[in-house]
């Protein structure tokens, strides 16, 4: 059975939206609006897997909404809503959890990384995170999920759960959603350590470029970014073993809309100092207008709330039917 193309993706409202979220995810969603039905969620229930300040959580939810719109997501063409506004996400998550063996969940590297050594203190929600993510996608019968590389394993689990459900009831009810790892910077690394992912939760603000950083801050962070003592290489292959150079050139390529090879050729043999100046200028020229528009949008929370409310109504219209059909297949009585 074939399913109509439907794109689903989301970002957690956990603060400090950064260049990795932009290049690895949000920016790549914009052209998809011309190719398929698109649904973009602010996954506030996922954010609860780490402690959140209740006031900040609301602000950050509006901030992610503003980032989507400022980056080019059109709330008329796409459905934009926050996850907790559609209760069916939680309900389907419970149901799907009943088809997800522990062995599958135990393999999830994000849980291992985030739980760290204090595994016994990790909350159940963090462990069940990928099941909720599967529910997010399958609730809309999502066929394509544009994400950064870090989410690929979770997508594979969503496919496995969809397949397990379909086999159990001998139906072709859920599509097997495909990850779309798009763009030249699918894994943007920390500016302080080229082997670590750029992340909202990194304690050092100098590890990331935030989408709302002003021009001076962006330039300073790039100037201070860790490098190595050698000039930039003349082949992409020579970036092996030079994670910081690799990361910065990857960021440049993605921002300039070039391939990595083109970026390497452009700066071959140059010192980091001149390359960093160009990278800073390019970063400011791309992110500056988006950050300014985000700030303008968050200045009118009433407008953002209206967009989210309308988005939730449209999301409900799809989700409620899929949940009801799922319950029926399982045999849950709706008297
Ligand atoms: N460094 C990155 N490079 C490329 N893509 C990235 N994404 C996140 N970091 C990078 C992509 O952004 C989307 C939304 O991610 P998220 O905020 O929901 O969750 P995350 O992956 O856990 O992001 P962070 O920044 O690492 O947040 P914290 O520190 O709170 O856990 C996803 O598509 C993701 O792939």
Image: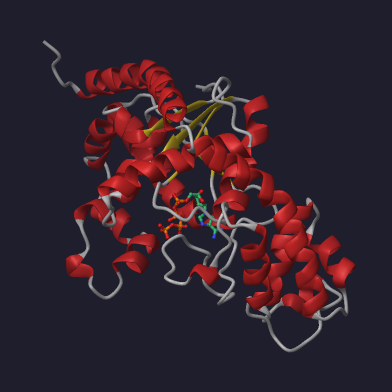
- Whole-percent x, y for residue 213 in the image: 58, 57
11 or 102: nearer the viewer: 11
Q: Hey, which quadrant is residue 84 in on the image?
A: top left
Q: Residue furthest bottom?
A: 229
Instruction: Please say if 213 is above or below 35.
Output: below
User: In this figure, which colouring scheme has been used for the structure?
Assistant: secondary structure
- Residue drawn at x 54%, y 56% is 18
For image coordinates 27% across by 37% down, the residue present is 93
Residue 131 showing in the rendered view:
no
User: Residue 126 occupies which quadrant of the picture?
Assistant: bottom left
**Residue situated in front as seen by the camera: 276 or 138:** 276
User: Up-down: is 287 above or below 331?
Assistant: below
Residue 60 visible in the shown view: yes
Residue found at x 38% / y 18%: 313
Q: Where does residue 108 sit, x and y in percent of width and height? A: 36, 59
How many numbered discs?
0
Q: Nearer the viewer, residue 231 or 130?
A: 231
Residue 123 vs residue 147: left or right? left
Q: Residue at x 45, y 48 (%)?
A: 156
- Foreground: 256 or 187? 256
Residue at the outermost left position: 335
Quadrant of image for the C terminus: top left
Q: Is residue 187 above or below residue 71?
A: below
Residue 17 position in % (x across, y down): 50, 52
Q: Could you say where residue 128 lies in the image, as x and y percent from the top left?
A: 27, 50
Residue found at the far front of this picture: 299
Q: Is residue 334 left or right of residue 125?
A: left
């Amino acid at each position: 059975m074939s399913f109509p193309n439907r794109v689903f993706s989301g970002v957690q409202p956990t603060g400090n939206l950064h260049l990795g979220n932009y290049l690895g995810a949000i920016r790549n969603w914009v052209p998809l609006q011309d190719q398929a039905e698109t649904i973009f969620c602010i996954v506030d229930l996922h954010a609860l897997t780490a402690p959140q300040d209740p006031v900040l959580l609301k602000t950050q939810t509006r901030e992610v909404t503003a980032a989507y719109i400022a980056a080019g997501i059109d709330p008329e063409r796409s459905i934009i809503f926050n996850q907790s506004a559609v209760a069916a996400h939680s309900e389907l998550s419970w149901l799907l959890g009943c088809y997800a063996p522990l062995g599958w969940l135990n393999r999830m590297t994000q849980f291992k990384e985030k739980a760290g050594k204090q595994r016994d203190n990790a909350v159940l929600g963090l462990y069940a995170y990928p099941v909720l993510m599967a529910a997010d996608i399958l609730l809309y019968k999502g066929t394509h999920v544009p994400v950064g590389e870090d989410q690929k394993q979770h997508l594979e689990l969503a496919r496995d759960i969809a397949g397990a459900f379909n086999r159990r009831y001998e139906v072709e009810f859920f599509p097997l959603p495909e990850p779309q790892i798009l763009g030249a910077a699918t894994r943007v690394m920390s500016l302080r350590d080229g082997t670590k992912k750029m992340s909202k939760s990194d304690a050092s603000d100098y590890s990331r470029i935030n989408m709302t950083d002003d021009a001076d801050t962006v330039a300073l962070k790039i100037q201070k970014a860790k490098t190595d003592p050698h000039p930039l290489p003349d082949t992409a292959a020579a970036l092996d073993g030079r994670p910081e150079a690799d990361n910065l050139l990857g960021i440049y390529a993605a921002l300039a809309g070039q391939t990595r090879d083109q970026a390497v050729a452009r700066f071959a043999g140059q010192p980091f100092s001149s390359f960093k100046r160009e990278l800073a200028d390019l970063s400011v020229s791309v992110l500056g207008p988006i950050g300014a528009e985000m700030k303008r949008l968050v200045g009118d929370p009433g407008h953002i709330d209206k967009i989210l409310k309308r988005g939730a109504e449209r999301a409900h219209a799809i989700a409620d039917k899929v949940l009801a059909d799922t319950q029926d297949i399982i045999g849950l009585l709706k008297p």
